[in-house]
Image (spheres, coloured by chain):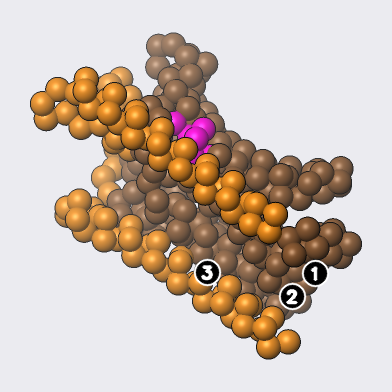
Chain colours: A brown, B orange
């Protein structure tokens, strides 16, 4: 999903930086509040951030002969919402842009939007809707994380198609980019969903009180899940 | 089924690896000399853009000088994340045992 350095012409890179900026600002504000009011959630925040570090460094081969990487931001989105996830995504994207020439400084806004905001927002909404409807928690987490991954790449395709409509127009360009990005991503999204589902299970087993404190799971659901695993 | 989910995820990863091996065999058979499959999707999209005649207007100010250095930095990135995850889960686990 990385748009490489210099691959977004003006005014698109400025636009995406402007779009992402408010989410980062709100995210920093929310982080501040979290540190002050719910200190016990900090290790969980570190886990969510570390997850983005691990997953986004693994470039996996997909079935169509090219490689791409999962994003890992779905977990942060489920646990802390898209604004804090945007900050976590920003940290990783800066690391990769500066040390690895992967992505870029000028394209940071666009990349933060796809990986840190759009994907996690989808994960967050699916998780909220799923728990409200009383769906199976782990199945909800799986779908939320897998779709967060996929949506990230769909958004990247949209961003590139907007900047490079070419001769075929937006939709023609979108299908060309989506063929590269989104199709490659389908199996990786499934894997990412499965891994994050597993991690969520371990969080439920080890530290469910943080999840109830963050209003992610009710105590009765936690007890039910823990009984099922015992 | 205490480990039901672990088994399901492991099975999924094995299927993923098997699909890769089968697909790789098919792709390698059609590949000419000096061609390489399994490149990055990021680069493919960049190629698609460059095919329209677009030139990137700015270059990264630093690039890993070789593939080895690049993989070193990627491994470092994964290691940083893995250490943090392992440390915290271990901390929680120990806290639970002590309680």
Q: Quadrant of residue A5?
A: top left
Magenta highlight range: A184-189
Q: Quadrant of residue A64?
A: top left
**Residue wearing tag 3:** B85
Instruction: Please say if A57 is above or below B50.
Output: below
Q: How far across and how far down the image is residue A95, in percent?
A: 39, 60
Spatial CA span between label 2 and label 3: 20 Å
View extreme (bottom): residue: B98
- Is residue A206 shown above or below A74? below
Distance Cα–Cα, label 1 vs label 2: 8 Å
Residue B27: where, in percent of width, then height? Answer: 27, 25
Please state the chain letter of the residue tagged with numbered disc 3 in the rendered image.
B
For the residues bearing labels 2 and 3, Cβ distance under 8 angstroms: no
Q: Which mark is residue A213?
A: 1
Q: Is residue A186 magenta?
A: yes
How packed is label 1: few (under 14 Cα within 10 Å), some, or many (20 or more)? some
Residue at the disc numbered 2: A38
Q: Estimate how packed mark 2 is, as few (under 14), some (14 to 19) or many (20 or more) residues with alpha carbons within 10 Å.
A: some
Q: Do marks 1 and 2 both belong to one polypeptide chain? A: yes
Q: Nearer the viewer, mark 3 or mark 1?
A: 3
Q: Are marks 2 and 3 on the same chain?
A: no
Magenta span includes A188: yes
Asked whether residue A57 is in view, the answer is yes
Q: Secondary structure at mark 1?
A: helix
Of residues A162 and A47, the one nearer the viewer is A47
Q: Nearer the viewer, residue A102 or A58?
A: A58
């Amino acid at each position: 999903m990385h748009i490489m350095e210099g691959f977004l012409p003006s005014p698109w890179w400025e636009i995406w930086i402007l779009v992402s900026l408010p989410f980062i600002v709100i995210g920093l504000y929310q982080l501040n509040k979290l540190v002050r009011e719910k200190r016990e959630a900090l290790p969980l925040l570190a886990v969510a951030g570390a997850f983005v570090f691990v997953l986004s460094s693994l470039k996996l081969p997909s079935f169509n002969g090219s490689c791409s990487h999962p994003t890992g931001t779905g977990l942060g989105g489920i646990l802390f919402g898209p604004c804090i996830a945007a900050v976590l995504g920003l940290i990783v994207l800066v690391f990769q842009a500066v040390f690895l020439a992967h992505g870029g400084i000028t394209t940071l806004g666009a990349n933060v939007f796809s990986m840190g905001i759009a994907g996690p927002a989808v994960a967050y909404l699916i998780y909220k809707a799923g728990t409200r409807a009383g769906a199976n928690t782990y199945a909800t987490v799986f779908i939320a994380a897998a779709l967060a991954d996929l949506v990230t790449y769909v958004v990247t395709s949209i961003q590139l198609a907007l900047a490079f409509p070419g001769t075929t127009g937006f939709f023609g360009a979108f299908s060309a980019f989506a063929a590269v990005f989104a199709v490659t991503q389908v199996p990786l999204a499934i894997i990412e969903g499965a891994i994050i589902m597993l991690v969520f299970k371990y969080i439920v087993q080890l530290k469910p009180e943080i999840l109830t404190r963050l209003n992610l799971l009710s105590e009765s659901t936690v007890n039910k899940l823990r009984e099922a695993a015992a | 089924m205490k480990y039901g989910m672990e088994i399901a995820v492991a099975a999924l990863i094995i299927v993923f690896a098997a699909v890769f091996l089968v697909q790789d065999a098919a792709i390698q058979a059609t590949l000419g000399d000096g061609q390489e499959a399994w490149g990055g999707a990021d680069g493919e999209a960049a190629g698609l853009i460059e095919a329209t005649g677009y030139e990137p207007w700015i270059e990264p100010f630093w690039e890993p000088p070789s593939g080895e250095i690049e993989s070193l930095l990627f491994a470092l990135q994964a290691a940083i994340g893995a250490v943090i995850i392992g440390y915290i889960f271990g901390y929680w686990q120990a806290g639970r045992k002590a309680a």
